[in-house]
C-alpha cells in the first residue's frame, strides 16, 4: 500500500545509495513511480505526497487513467516504460513526455513521423536487452549504436538508455554494460533499477529508477 512511510523510506534509500557512488558518478536520480495497475485515487495520493514522475507500461491503460490526471497536474511527467506497438504511436506521442522503449528502426520512424505531423517533440530512451533474452524487448547491445544513429538521422531526441536485466542473474554486469554503452554513445541518462535492485543500479550509475512495489506494495501477478 502507498503510504507516506513507503515514499519516505524509498526516497531515503535512494539518497543513501546516491551517497555510495564513486566519482565520477554524480548528479540527480529521478524516481519514476511505476503506477501500472494503480487506480487514479492512489496516483492522486502519490502526487499529493510529492511524487512528480510516473511510468506506465501499457498505452491502453495509460489512456484510461492519465488524460484527466495530467490535466489536473500539468507539472507531472509521464514515461512509457513498456513495449510500444507502431499502431499505438499517435496515442503514445500525445500522452507521454518520455518514451523509454524505443527498440527498432520502424518504431523510430513512426515516432518521428507522428512528431512531424503533430508538431509535438518528445524525449526518448533506447531500450537495451542487455541479457539478450529472446522473449524480451530491446535491442541487443551490439545493435545499439546503429539504432542510435538511425534515431539521430531522423531527428529524434534520444537522451538515454533503458534496460530490464534478467530476473535470475546477477544484475551488476548489466548495469555496468549500460554505463559503458551510454558513455560510448554520449547519452547521459540511464533508466535501470526496479524495486529489487535499485540501490545497486544507483551505485552503478542509474539516473532513473522505476519503482512499483517498493512504493505501492506488491501487485497481483496479472499486472506484473
Ligand atoms: C512494473 C515495472 C517496473 C517496476 O517494477 P517493481 O519491481 O514493482 O518495482 C519497472 N520497470 C518496468 C518496465 C515495469 O514494467
Image: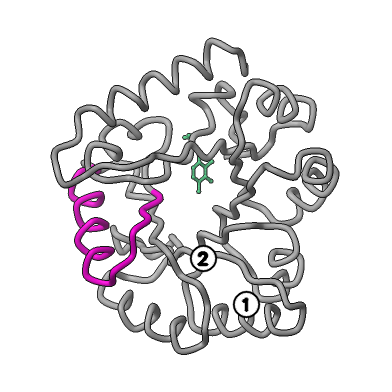
Residue at x-position 26% and y-position 35%: 200
The quarter holding residue 193 reads top left
Q: Marks 2 and 1: in contact by CB < 8 Å? A: yes
**Is 31 situated above or below 99?**
above
Q: Nearer the viewer, residue 144 or 167?
A: 144
x and y percent of residue 33 in the render? Answer: 56, 36
x and y percent of residue 197 in the render? Answer: 33, 34
Q: Magenta part of the protein: which range?
A: 171-191
The residue at the far top in this view is 5
Q: How crowded is mark 2: few (under 14 residues within 10 Å), some or many (20 or more)?
A: many
* Magenta residue check for 43: no
* Magenta residue check for 190: yes
**Is 42 situated above or below 208?**
above
CA–CA distance in space, label 1 to label 2: 10 Å
- Asked whether, in this view, residue 205 is left or right of residue 60, the answer is left
Q: Residue 124 carries which label?
A: 2
Q: Is the magenta stretch mostly helix, strand or loop?
A: helix
The residue at the far bottom in this view is 153
Amino acid at each position: 500500500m502507498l503510504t507516506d512511510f513507503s515514499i519516505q523510506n524509498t526516497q531515503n534509500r535512494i539518497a543513501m545509495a546516491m551517497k555510495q557512488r564513486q566519482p565520477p558518478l554524480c548528479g540527480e536520480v529521478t524516481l519514476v513511480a511505476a503506477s501500472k495497475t494503480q487506480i487514479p485515487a492512489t496516483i492522486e495520493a502519490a502526487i499529493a505526497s510529492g511524487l512528480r514522475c510516473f511510468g506506465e507500461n501499457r498505452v491502453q491503460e495509460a489512456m484510461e487513467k492519465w488524460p484527466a490526471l495530467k490535466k489536473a497536474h500539468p507539472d507531472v511527467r509521464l514515461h512509457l516504460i513498456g513495449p510500444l506497438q507502431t499502431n499505438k504511436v499517435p496515442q503514445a506521442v500525445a500522452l507521454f513526455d518520455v518514451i523509454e522503449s524505443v527498440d527498432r528502426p520502424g518504431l523510430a520512424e513512426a515516432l518521428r513521423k507522428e512528431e512531424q505531423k503533430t508538431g509535438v517533440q518528445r524525449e526518448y530512451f533506447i531500450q537495451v536487452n542487455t541479457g539478450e533474452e529472446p522473449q524480451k524487448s530491446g535491442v541487443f547491445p551490439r545493435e545499439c549504436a546503429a539504432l542510435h544513429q538511425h534515431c539521430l538521422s531522423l531527428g529524434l531526441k534520444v537522451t538515454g538508455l533503458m534496460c530490464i536485466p534478467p530476473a535470475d542473474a546477477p544484475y551488476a554486469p548489466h548495469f555496468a554494460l549500460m554505463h559503458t554503452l551510454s558513455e560510448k554513445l554520449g547519452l547521459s541518462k540511464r533508466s535501470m533499477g526496479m524495486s529489487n535492485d535499485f540501490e545497486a543500479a544507483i551505485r552503478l550509475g542509474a539516473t532513473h529508477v522505476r519503482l512499483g512495489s517498493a512504493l505501492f506494495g506488491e501487485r497481483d501477478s496479472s499486472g506484473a
